[in-house]
Image (cartoon, grey):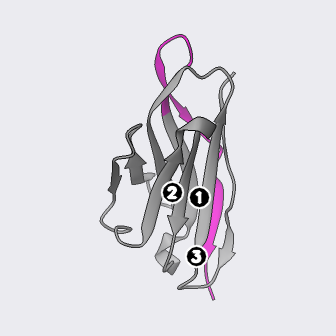
Amino acid sequence: QVQLVESGGGLVQPGGSLRLPCAASGRIYSINVMAWYRQAPGKQRELVATITSGRRANYADSVAGRFTISRDNAKNTVYLQMNSLKPEDTAVYYCNADLHDGSGFIDYWGQGTQVTVSS
């Protein structure tokens, strides 16, 4: 059984920073793209950033220059470093991985971690 577990969320003041790790565990043969999404109250889930197995990253325009996605392939872990946080970054952040569990490549999701940016 494959699991993705996020952590690191919490309450932070505007301008502050948070780092979100997401670890994948279980029967994993390989991981292709890993990503972070977020969903604010009353809004659709949106893509924040992606990173390939070769560590090529892409970002949503709203977070480019403030957020950095990275991964440790040996630990099956993806990170989201969030700097210069704004109130509009408040959302539940979800980890996503396109990984091979022995049956084929399947999209897996974490349970989400709440990030609240407020003074």
Q: Residue at x 34, y 47 (%)?
A: 56
| Mark 1 surroundings: few (<14), some (14-19) or many (≥20) residues within 10 A | some
Asked whether disc 2 touches disc 1, contact meaning CB atoms under 8 Å apart, the reply is yes
| Mark 3 surroundings: few (<14), some (14-19) or many (≥20) residues within 10 A | some
Q: Position of residue 79 (x, y in %)?
A: 55, 54
Question: Does the magenta-highlighted stretch encompass residue 106?
Answer: yes
Which region is colored magenta?
A: 98-119
Q: Residue at x 55, y 19 (%)?
A: 29
Q: Secondary structure at mark 1?
A: strand
Asked whether disc 2 touches disc 3, contact meaning CB atoms under 8 Å apart, the reply is no
114 left or right of 52 in image: right
| Mark 2 surroundings: few (<14), some (14-19) or many (≥20) residues within 10 A | some
Mark toward the start of the polypeptide (3 vs 1): 3
Residue 41 visible? The answer is no
Image quadrant holding the C terminus, namely bottom right
Circle 3 or circle 1, nearest the eye: 3
In the image, 41 versus 8, the foreground residue is 8
Per the image, the residue denoted by label 3 is: 17
34 left or right of 108 in image: left
The type of residue carrying mark 3 is Ser
Q: Position of residue 26 (x, y in %)?
A: 69, 25
Instruction: Residue lying at the far front in this picture: please name it.
Output: 74
Residue 16 visible? The answer is yes
Q: Could you give the CA–CA distance between mark 3 and mark 1, rounded to whole angstroms?
A: 16 Å
Per the image, the residue denoted by label 2 is: 39
62 left or right of 14 in image: left
Q: Position of residue 46 (x, y in %)?
A: 41, 53
Q: Which mark is residue 92?
A: 1
Q: Could you give the CA–CA distance between mark 2 and mark 1, rounded to whole angstroms?
A: 5 Å
Q: Position of residue 18 (x, y in %)?
A: 61, 70
Question: Does the magenta-highlighted stretch encompass residue 110?
Answer: yes
Q: Could you give the CA–CA distance between mark 2 and mark 3, rounded to whole angstroms?
A: 19 Å
